[in-house]
Image (tube, helix red, strand yellow):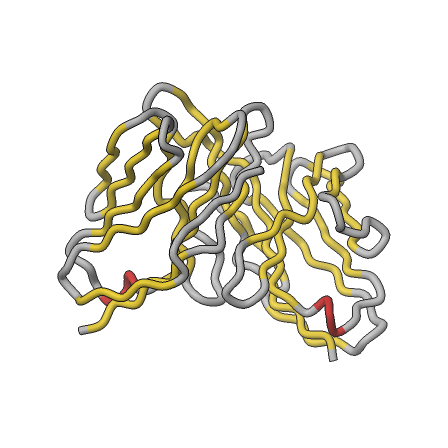
Amino acid sequence: GAVVSQHPSRVICKSGTSVKIECRSLDFQATTMFWYRQFPKQSLMLMATSNEGSKATYEQGVEKDKFLINHASLTLSTLTVTSAHPEDSSFYICSARGPGARGRGTTNEKLFFGSGTQLSVL
Amino acid sequence: GQNIDQPTEMTATEGAIVQINCTYQTSGFNGLFWYQQHAGEAPTFLSYNVLDGLEEKGRFSSFLSRSKGYSYLLLKELQMKDSASYLCAVTLGGSYIPTFGRGTSLIVHP
């Protein structure tokens, strides 16, 4: 099946530093990737939609200058958390639309998720 | 809005059957996903429902009623490894971007 690779899996950094997270689709082309954030025992919250070759679309309340997204190719999207602070500590997960999921009557592209990045800012 | 609602936590016995419900209030509803997520790991795809009815896939089945804004995930012959969080996600027509519920933490005990 389709594979999405996400690195690093865990980051511990000092407050004020920037952290880059990579998301790669290994065996399919992903024109659109999604970045989610998840706090413990909470739902996945969509942060932004990353579109290859164009600017990302950010959800309301997400600071685009804080969370920089670059989607330079059909297989790679990066999320950079700039000047990270302790409140940015969270589990970040990327996903990409891959080969279709067929429900009765129609087809939709199911999301394949990366393995996630646990960011801890000290 | 989506207002996706699922129970926070459920417990069940190994070998038993458990049903996890999900209700939603949304306009432009397109389809509903179920994902399984173990702690600290990425969600994995379980099912996708668009039309009313039951879809069975091995030990897992998913049901949808569009008119009632209701879905459930049915897990049979529970195994210890089924202990995980189960996420219900709804997609709106056009964008196909899933919006996730809070997830239901399922604990399977011997």
Residue B57 left/right relative to A23 = left
Residue A62 left/right relative to B79 = right
Judging depth in this view, the residue of B70 and A89 nearest the camera is B70
Judging depth in this view, the residue of B42 and B16 nearest the camera is B16
Residue A56 x, y percent position in the rendering:
76, 39
Residue found at x 48% / y 31%: A109
Query: Quarter of the image containing the C terminus of chain A?
Result: bottom right
Residue found at x 13% / y 62%: B15
Quadrant in the picture for residue B86: bottom left
Residue B45 x, y percent position in the rendering:
40, 45
Residue found at x 31% / y 26%: B52
How many labels sit on residues?
A: 0
Residue A51 x, y percent position in the rendering:
71, 35
Judging depth in this view, the residue of B20 and B94 nearest the camera is B20
Please, is residue B26 above or below residue B37 in the view? Answer: above
Residue at the extreme top of the image, as rendered: A105
Residue B106 x, y percent position in the rendering:
33, 63
Residue B96 left/right relative to B14 = right
Query: Quarter of the image containing the N terminus of chain A?
Result: top left
Residue B103 left/right relative to A118 = left
Please, is residue B73 above or below residue B18 in the view? Answer: above
Residue found at x 55% / y 53%: A44
Please, is residue A12 above or below residue B6 in the view? Answer: below
Judging depth in this view, the residue of A78 and B7 nearest the camera is B7
Quadrant in the picture for residue A17: bottom right
